[in-house]
Amino acid sequence: MAAPPKTKTKMDQSLVRRQPCQVRSREKVELILEATIEILDKEGLEALTTNRIAEVAGISIGTLYQYFSNKQQVVDELAQRESDYLTTELLAVLTAPDAQSPEARLRQIIRTLLSGFGGRHQVRRIVLEQAIARGHNPLITPGHVSTFLTSAPLRDTDGRRVTLSPIEAFVLTRSVMGAIGSALSHNEQWLASAAFEDSLLALIQGFLHACGNNHQVHAASAKT
Protein backbone atom coordinates (compact mmCIF):
# COMPACT_ATOMS: atom_id res chain seq x y z
CA MET A 1 0.00 0.00 0.00
CA ALA A 2 1.44 3.35 -1.02
CA ALA A 3 2.20 5.82 1.71
CA PRO A 4 -0.16 8.81 1.82
CA PRO A 5 1.30 11.99 0.34
CA LYS A 6 2.95 14.27 2.84
CA THR A 7 1.27 17.57 3.59
CA LYS A 8 3.44 20.63 3.97
CA THR A 9 3.64 21.99 7.48
CA LYS A 10 4.14 25.66 8.30
CA MET A 11 7.78 24.82 9.00
CA ASP A 12 8.14 23.21 5.56
CA GLN A 13 6.63 26.28 3.93
CA SER A 14 8.96 28.63 5.79
CA LEU A 15 11.97 26.57 4.75
CA VAL A 16 11.08 26.75 1.08
CA ARG A 17 10.39 30.49 1.18
CA ARG A 18 13.01 32.12 -1.02
CA GLN A 19 15.73 33.90 0.88
CA PRO A 20 17.39 37.13 -0.34
CA CYS A 21 20.76 35.56 -1.16
CA GLN A 22 21.51 37.07 -4.54
CA VAL A 23 22.05 40.69 -5.44
CA ARG A 24 18.75 40.96 -7.27
CA SER A 25 16.94 39.48 -4.31
CA ARG A 26 18.58 41.94 -1.91
CA GLU A 27 17.55 44.77 -4.19
CA LYS A 28 13.94 43.57 -4.04
CA VAL A 29 14.08 43.47 -0.24
CA GLU A 30 15.46 47.02 -0.16
CA LEU A 31 12.65 48.18 -2.44
CA ILE A 32 10.11 46.62 -0.09
CA LEU A 33 11.66 48.20 3.00
CA GLU A 34 11.99 51.64 1.42
CA ALA A 35 8.39 51.48 0.21
CA THR A 36 7.27 50.58 3.73
CA ILE A 37 9.20 53.52 5.18
CA GLU A 38 7.63 55.86 2.63
CA ILE A 39 4.11 54.65 3.43
CA LEU A 40 4.61 54.91 7.19
CA ASP A 41 6.14 58.35 6.85
CA LYS A 42 3.50 59.84 4.55
CA GLU A 43 0.35 57.81 5.18
CA GLY A 44 0.73 56.16 8.59
CA LEU A 45 0.31 52.61 9.88
CA GLU A 46 -3.37 52.43 8.90
CA ALA A 47 -2.43 52.64 5.22
CA LEU A 48 0.18 49.88 5.44
CA THR A 49 -0.89 46.70 3.65
CA THR A 50 1.10 44.21 1.62
CA ASN A 51 -0.75 45.32 -1.50
CA ARG A 52 0.12 48.95 -0.84
CA ILE A 53 3.77 48.08 -0.16
CA ALA A 54 3.99 46.16 -3.44
CA GLU A 55 2.35 49.04 -5.30
CA VAL A 56 4.76 51.67 -3.96
CA ALA A 57 7.76 49.34 -4.42
CA GLY A 58 6.76 48.70 -8.04
CA ILE A 59 6.65 44.92 -7.67
CA SER A 60 3.96 42.26 -7.73
CA ILE A 61 2.32 41.05 -4.53
CA GLY A 62 3.66 37.59 -5.35
CA THR A 63 7.21 38.92 -5.38
CA LEU A 64 6.69 40.54 -1.99
CA TYR A 65 5.46 37.23 -0.52
CA GLN A 66 8.63 35.53 -1.71
CA TYR A 67 10.51 37.49 0.95
CA PHE A 68 7.98 38.43 3.64
CA SER A 69 4.94 36.45 4.76
CA ASN A 70 3.01 39.51 5.98
CA LYS A 71 3.37 43.24 6.64
CA GLN A 72 4.32 42.67 10.29
CA GLN A 73 7.40 40.76 9.20
CA VAL A 74 8.44 43.77 7.09
CA VAL A 75 7.98 46.08 10.08
CA ASP A 76 10.00 43.69 12.27
CA GLU A 77 12.85 43.78 9.75
CA LEU A 78 12.86 47.58 9.89
CA ALA A 79 12.91 47.50 13.70
CA GLN A 80 15.87 45.11 13.67
CA ARG A 81 17.74 47.38 11.29
CA GLU A 82 17.22 50.31 13.65
CA SER A 83 18.76 48.21 16.41
CA ASP A 84 21.71 47.10 14.27
CA TYR A 85 22.43 50.65 13.12
CA LEU A 86 22.37 51.95 16.67
CA THR A 87 24.62 49.13 17.86
CA THR A 88 27.24 49.83 15.19
CA GLU A 89 27.33 53.54 15.98
CA LEU A 90 27.56 52.95 19.71
CA LEU A 91 30.37 50.41 19.34
CA ALA A 92 32.43 52.97 17.42
CA VAL A 93 32.08 55.44 20.29
CA LEU A 94 32.79 52.93 23.05
CA THR A 95 35.93 51.58 21.37
CA ALA A 96 37.39 55.02 20.64
CA PRO A 97 40.44 56.11 22.71
CA ASP A 98 39.45 57.25 26.20
CA ALA A 99 40.84 60.78 25.86
CA GLN A 100 37.77 62.78 26.91
CA SER A 101 36.57 63.90 30.32
CA PRO A 102 34.13 61.44 31.96
CA GLU A 103 31.19 63.78 31.36
CA ALA A 104 32.12 64.49 27.73
CA ARG A 105 32.45 60.77 27.00
CA LEU A 106 29.08 59.99 28.57
CA ARG A 107 27.44 62.83 26.64
CA GLN A 108 28.88 61.46 23.41
CA ILE A 109 27.42 58.05 24.21
CA ILE A 110 24.02 59.59 24.95
CA ARG A 111 24.06 61.69 21.79
CA THR A 112 24.96 58.62 19.76
CA LEU A 113 21.99 56.78 21.24
CA LEU A 114 19.68 59.70 20.54
CA SER A 115 21.04 60.24 17.03
CA GLY A 116 19.55 56.90 16.05
CA PHE A 117 16.18 58.58 16.24
CA GLY A 118 17.03 61.66 14.21
CA GLY A 119 15.08 62.31 11.04
CA ARG A 120 11.97 60.23 10.40
CA HIS A 121 10.77 60.00 13.99
CA GLN A 122 7.30 58.83 13.00
CA VAL A 123 8.62 55.79 11.16
CA ARG A 124 10.98 54.84 13.97
CA ARG A 125 8.24 55.28 16.56
CA ILE A 126 5.85 53.09 14.62
CA VAL A 127 8.27 50.22 13.94
CA LEU A 128 9.58 50.20 17.51
CA GLU A 129 6.11 50.42 19.07
CA GLN A 130 4.95 47.56 16.87
CA ALA A 131 7.93 45.44 17.91
CA ILE A 132 7.39 46.21 21.60
CA ALA A 133 3.67 45.42 21.30
CA ARG A 134 4.61 41.98 20.00
CA GLY A 135 6.70 41.27 23.07
CA HIS A 136 10.22 42.34 22.19
CA ASN A 137 12.14 45.59 22.16
CA PRO A 138 14.89 45.67 19.51
CA LEU A 139 16.52 48.56 21.37
CA ILE A 140 17.51 46.38 24.31
CA THR A 141 18.12 42.91 22.93
CA PRO A 142 20.68 40.84 24.88
CA GLY A 143 24.14 40.92 23.31
CA HIS A 144 23.80 44.47 22.00
CA VAL A 145 24.21 47.51 24.21
CA SER A 146 24.75 45.49 27.38
CA THR A 147 27.72 43.67 25.88
CA PHE A 148 29.39 46.91 24.84
CA LEU A 149 28.89 48.53 28.22
CA THR A 150 30.56 45.59 29.97
CA SER A 151 33.46 45.52 27.50
CA ALA A 152 34.22 49.24 27.60
CA PRO A 153 35.23 50.63 31.02
CA LEU A 154 33.65 53.99 31.77
CA ARG A 155 34.52 56.65 34.33
CA ASP A 156 32.31 58.07 37.04
CA THR A 157 32.24 61.70 38.16
CA ASP A 158 35.35 61.12 40.30
CA GLY A 159 37.30 59.81 37.32
CA ARG A 160 37.29 56.23 38.57
CA ARG A 161 37.17 53.55 35.89
CA VAL A 162 34.05 51.46 36.31
CA THR A 163 33.53 48.21 34.43
CA LEU A 164 29.92 47.14 34.78
CA SER A 165 29.02 43.56 35.57
CA PRO A 166 26.50 41.87 33.26
CA ILE A 167 23.71 42.50 35.79
CA GLU A 168 24.66 46.15 36.24
CA ALA A 169 24.85 46.64 32.49
CA PHE A 170 21.46 44.96 32.12
CA VAL A 171 19.84 47.35 34.61
CA LEU A 172 21.49 50.48 33.18
CA THR A 173 20.81 49.52 29.56
CA ARG A 174 17.14 48.88 30.19
CA SER A 175 16.80 52.08 32.18
CA VAL A 176 18.35 54.29 29.51
CA MET A 177 16.87 52.61 26.44
CA GLY A 178 13.52 52.18 28.17
CA ALA A 179 13.39 55.94 28.73
CA ILE A 180 14.24 56.62 25.08
CA GLY A 181 11.70 54.10 23.83
CA SER A 182 8.99 55.57 26.06
CA ALA A 183 9.79 59.10 24.91
CA LEU A 184 9.21 58.01 21.31
CA SER A 185 5.56 57.30 22.09
CA HIS A 186 5.01 59.90 24.84
CA ASN A 187 6.64 63.03 23.41
CA GLU A 188 9.25 62.50 20.69
CA GLN A 189 10.30 66.16 20.88
CA TRP A 190 11.96 65.35 24.20
CA LEU A 191 14.60 63.36 22.32
CA ALA A 192 16.00 66.59 20.87
CA SER A 193 15.90 68.54 24.13
CA ALA A 194 18.86 69.43 26.36
CA ALA A 195 16.75 68.57 29.42
CA PHE A 196 16.29 64.97 28.25
CA GLU A 197 20.01 64.60 27.54
CA ASP A 198 20.87 66.06 30.96
CA SER A 199 18.43 63.69 32.66
CA LEU A 200 19.97 60.66 30.98
CA LEU A 201 23.44 61.94 31.92
CA ALA A 202 22.41 62.28 35.57
CA LEU A 203 20.96 58.76 35.50
CA ILE A 204 24.13 57.21 34.11
CA GLN A 205 26.49 59.26 36.30
CA GLY A 206 24.60 58.37 39.46
CA PHE A 207 24.50 54.70 38.52
CA LEU A 208 28.22 54.55 37.69
CA HIS A 209 29.11 56.35 40.93
CA ALA A 210 27.05 53.91 42.98
CA CYS A 211 28.53 50.91 41.15
CA GLY A 212 32.05 52.25 41.70
CA ASN A 213 31.41 52.57 45.42
CA ASN A 214 29.95 49.07 45.60
CA HIS A 215 32.94 47.61 43.77
CA GLN A 216 35.33 49.26 46.24
CA VAL A 217 33.36 47.96 49.21
CA HIS A 218 33.35 44.43 47.80
CA ALA A 219 37.09 44.61 47.02
CA ALA A 220 37.84 45.78 50.57
CA SER A 221 35.70 43.00 52.06
CA ALA A 222 37.48 40.39 49.96
CA LYS A 223 40.84 41.48 51.38
CA THR A 224 39.75 41.12 55.01
Image (cartoon, rainbow, N blue to C red):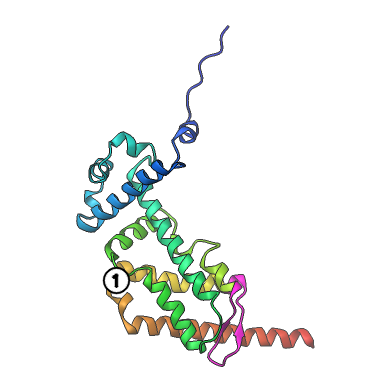
Q: Quadrant of the N terminus?
A: top right
Q: What is the secondary structure assignment of the residue under circle 1?
A: helix
Relative side of 113 to 190, left or right: right
Magenta stretch, residue numbers = 151-168
Horizontally, residue 81 falls left or right of residue 222, namely: left
The extreme top residue here reads 1
Q: Is residue 188 magenta?
A: no
Q: Residue furthest left?
A: 43
Quadrant location of the C terminus in the rendered image: bottom right
Residue lying at 24% horizontally and 58% vertically, measured from the top left: 41
Q: Is residue 170 placed above or below 19 in the rendered structure?
A: below
Mark 1 sits on what residue? 188
Q: Residue at x 51, y 68 (%)?
A: 145
The verdict on residue 162 being magenta is yes
- For disc 1, the neighbor class at 10 Å (few under 14, some 14 to 19, many from 20) is some
- Visible residue check, residue 220: yes
Q: Position of residue 117 (x, y in %)?
A: 35, 68
Percent across and percent down for residue 189 are 27, 74
Q: Amino acid at mark 1?
A: Glu
Asked whether 163 or 137 is in front, the reply is 163
Among the 4 quarters of the image, the one containing residue 179: bottom left
x and y percentages locating residue 123 in the rendered image: 29, 60
Residue 149 lies, in percent from the top left, at 55, 73
Q: Is residue 187 visible?
A: no
Q: Is residue 135 above or below residue 176?
A: above
Residue, x 30% and y 52% (percent of image)?
Answer: 34
Residues 24 and 188: in front is 24
Residue 4, relative to residue 59: is it above or below? above
| Residue at the bottom extreme of this rendering | 158
